[in-house]
Image: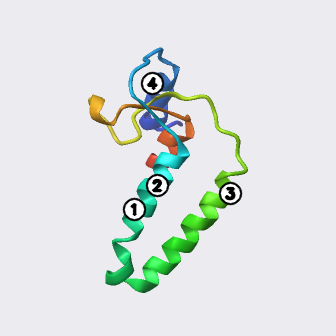
Amino acid sequence: MRSPHCRTSGYIHGSSIGVGELHTIDVEMDRLYRRLEEFQVSSPKVYLMLRDLLKRITTKAAWIPPEAAVPSHGENFGLIDVEYFVQAEPSFDLSKYCG
């Protein structure tokens, strides 16, 4: 049985809504790299592990061709707010829910 989030994401992805900024993997990786710096002093071991993980993800992502952007929310939702509404690859929503 599919979760309500998967079903709702499917409805959103299939809609013809055309608003929202383009949210590529580069945008998401830049956000994660900026957050990474918060760990450098407070938890050096975590910083090194996360840095290595982000480098590996970046390397792997470079080999995957981008998908066509679809309407995407990228967060849990009950009522969709336009602040977090973007045009992104379908996997963007899935990755946020799995995370």
Which residue is the site of mark 3? 60
Q: How many marks?
A: 4
Instruction: Please say if the residues under marks 2 and 1 sit with CB atoms less than 8 Å apart.
Output: yes
Q: Disc 1 residue type?
A: Arg
Residue under the point 49% across and 72% down: 50
Which residue is the site of mark 1? 34
Q: Position of residue 22 (x, y in %)?
A: 47, 33
Which residue is the site of mark 4? 12
Q: Disc 3 residue type?
A: Lys
Closer to the chain start, of discs 4 and 3, is 4
Towards the viewer: 68 or 94: 68
Which marked residue is nearer to the observer: mark 2 or mark 3? 2
Which marked residue is nearer to the observer: mark 3 or mark 1? 1
Closer to the chain start, of discs 2 and 4, is 4
Q: Position of residue 17 (x, y in %)?
A: 43, 17
Q: Is residue 99 visible?
A: no
Question: Among all residues in the image, which is located at the extreme top?
Answer: 16
Q: Position of residue 54 (x, y in %)?
A: 55, 65
Closer to the chain start, of discs 3 and 1, is 1
